[in-house]
Amino acid sequence: MPLIRDLPQHDRPRERLRDVGADVLSDQELLAIVLRTGAAGENALAQAQRLLAEFGGLAGLRRASVPELCRSKHIGPAKAAQLKAALALGFRLAQSTPAAREKVSSADSIAAMWLHEMSAFDQEHVRVVLLDSRNQVIAKAEPYIGSPHAAHVRIGDLLADAVRMKATALVLVHNHPSGDPSPSAEDIRLTKTLAEAAQLMGLELCDHVIIGGGKFMSLRSAHVPFAERPAAGVA
């Protein structure tokens, strides 16, 4: 595997950050900058992608302890500390600027966050948007990255950040790499199961938005029953 310094300049994360800004870079590229170096047979970009898959995205990495990170291949105490520090700073920044929080008013506002990005993925990415009592965004997380064929998602992973951050509600978002955002039977089953589990924990599942091929579908707007006693959603 080539070293990052051997890649074309426009493919190197640090140079891309300098030229186009951090907001354009993917989670993988930003994580590679934090890691700085890879290891034998694995450059920093490959290491970043492996860590995101292994821990279930940035949210999973932030939840992981230093010992848990150190059990991952090629991650020692120094790199684990770098990761924890960078993720903690990002979390503190998000918490310190409540006035800048987005407000969710409809499924359109949810889809607009990731429509183009998630339409381009060739794997399923499952994300959650955490909301407060005024439908303002507290945080966004990506608890799962899966295969393009099937997602085996644990309900506890989808709710973990909402419980820890004392959210009032959440919106589930995932993509269909096929390009068709129509819900499958499994999507509907997951929606009902998550809504019922959230309700038991005092949370509301406002919507499940599916993205594919530059289009999206809101299961709330499609009148999919979320739970035995569904609460009013954002759509």
Image (tube, rainbow, N blue to C red):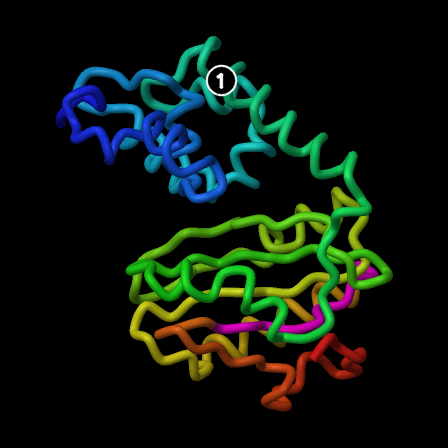
Camera-side residue: 16 or 170? Answer: 16
Query: Is residue 205 highlighted in magenta?
Result: yes
Q: Is residue 107 above or below residue 49?
A: below
Q: Is residue 106 above or below residue 71?
A: below
Q: Quadrant of residue 214?
A: bottom left
Secondary structure of the residue carrying tag 1 is helix
The quadrant of the rendering that contains the N terminus is top left
Residue picked out by circle 1: 80
Q: Position of residue 203 (x, y in %)?
A: 79, 62
Q: Is residue 27 shown in magenta?
A: no
Q: Is residue 203 left or right of residue 2?
A: right
Residue stretch in magenta? 201-210
| Residue 201 point in image, percent of width and height | 79, 59
Return the residue found at the far bottom. Answer: 223
Q: Residue furthest front?
A: 19
Q: What residue do we see at 56% from left, 41% from top?
A: 59
* Left or right, residue 3 beside residue 198: left
**x, y (%) of residue 13?**
33, 30
Judge left or right: residue 226 versus residue 87. Answer: right
The one of 117 and 224 positioned closer to us in this rendering: 117
Percent x, y of residue 33? 40, 24
Residue at 32% x, 27% y: name it.
15
* Residue 118 relative to residue 108: left or right: left
